Amino acid sequence: MLSECKTRLNLPSRYFLSVSCSHPRKNIETLIKAFIQFNSKKREHKLVLVWSNPPKSILNLCQKNIENSDIIFLKYISDKDLVSVYNGATATFFPTRYEGFGFPILESFACNTPVVTCRNTSLPEVGGNIALYTDEDGVDEMSYYMELFENENFDLHLFREQAKNYIKRFSWENTALQYVELYKSLL
């Protein structure tokens, strides 16, 4: 299913992923600047942005600095395809400035895909000690993590195993058990 989805959506063999929207707090401009810096040495990885309506300023930034084939915008994809896109990514980048919870972190972990996110608001609570963290304006840090993932000697297996185990704490069953324990403690 993954290879069929990659072919149908014309995805590269190696890519970084970001699932976002046009709200400025999502901080995608910083991610694109990090990718421009990373890609200045013509790397193998591409950047896939699941983003229904990117603003002209972002499109202009991409067109001025990156070859068209290096950043791929996926506008409207099904939830089924989104799972495949997460599964195919080397890592998910979620550079948001503030977030109430951060579902893309858990979605990525559920697909055993490492996450790079910011060390602000609720994100460290959601990402725990599994996610990798940057400052919200950390172009150099994000670019560094891209280089780290690009390295063929870097072992993603450890991250994938940790994500698989970590995500279990967010299951509905575990959440229900925590509520039961809380309720019992209040009686």
Image (cartoon, rainbow, N blue to C red):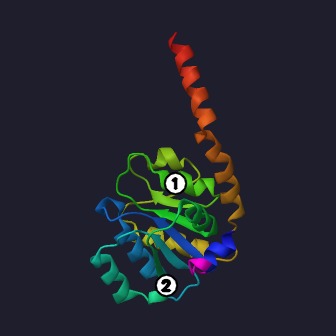
Q: Residue 22: which numbered mark, if any?
A: none
| Secondary element at image label 2 | helix
| Residue at the image position 69 percent from the left and 68 percent from the top | 1
Residue 5: percent from the left, percent from the top?
A: 62, 73
Asked which quadrant contains residue 13, the reply is bottom right
Task: Please determine whether, in this image, residue 122 is positioned above or below residue 40.
Answer: above
Q: Which residue is mark 1?
A: 105
Is-magenta flag for residue 77? no
| Residue at the image position 58 percent from the left and 66 percent from the top | 81
**Crowd tier of the residue under label 2, counting other residues whose Cα lies within 10 Å: few below 14, some 14–19, many 20 or above:** some
Residue 34: percent from the left, percent from the top?
A: 42, 75
**Which residue lies most toward the top here?**
187
Q: Is residue 176 left or right of residue 98?
A: right
Q: Residue 70: which numbered mark, if any?
A: 2
Amino acid type, mark 2: Asp
Contact, CB < 8 Å: mark 2 with mark 1?
no
User: Magenta stretch: dominant SS?
Assistant: loop
Amino acid type, mark 1: Ile
Which segment did they paint magenta? Answer: 8-12
Q: First in sequence: mark 2 or mark 1?
A: 2
| Secondary element at image label 1 | helix
